[in-house]
């Protein structure tokens, strides 16, 4: 996947009949892209990763603030999203980076 493909997902939000579920799928794709960009490179910056995750949360806060039909809350643990990263690399940064989007 490329940046332009990830950005292309945003087009669905311009449709008149987009559902909450579809909008959440777009938000999820964008979240995965943030994780990919910030956590899958040769050097991972904890500060940059936290800032990018916070920016994503702020960008999508209105969507996740709406009442939805599912009681599940989206939970992403960056460590789970980045299985290729060694545990020692994460341990050395003392990063336990979980993002819980409250709604």
Image: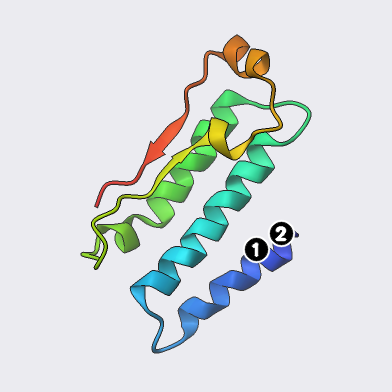
Question: In front here: 51 or 37?
Answer: 37
Residue contact between numbered discs 2 and 1, judged by CB atoms under 8 Å: yes
Task: Name the residue beneath numbered marker 1.
Answer: 6
* Rendered image: mark on residue 3: 2
Say above or below: 63 vs 46.
Answer: below
Residue lying farthest bottom? 16
| Residue 38, x across and y down, in percent | 64, 38
User: Which residue: 47% across, 77% down?
Assistant: 13
| Apparent side of residue 38 relative to residue 12 in the rendered image (left or right) | right
Mark 2 and mark 1: Cα distance apart in space: 5 Å
Say above or below: 21 vs 15.
Answer: above
| Residue 78, x across and y down, in percent | 53, 35
User: Which residue: 71% across, 32% down?
Assistant: 84
**Judging from the image, what secondary structure is the residue with disc 2 in?**
helix
| Apparent side of residue 66 relative to residue 93 in the rendered image (left or right) | left
Q: Quadrant of the N terminus?
A: bottom right
């Amino acid at each position: 996947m490329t940046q332009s493909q990830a950005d292309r997902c945003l087009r669905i939000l311009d449709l008149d009949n987009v559902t909450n579920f579809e909008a959440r799928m777009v938000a999820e794709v964008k979240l995965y892209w943030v994780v990919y960009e910030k956590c899958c490179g040769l050097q991972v910056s904890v500060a940059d990763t936290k800032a990018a995750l916070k920016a994503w949360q702020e960008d999508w806060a209105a969507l996740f603030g709406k009442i939805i039909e599912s009681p599940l809350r989206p939970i992403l643990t960056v460590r789970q999203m980045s299985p290729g990263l060694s545990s020692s690399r994460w341990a050395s940064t003392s990063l336990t980076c979980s993002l819980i989007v409250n709604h």
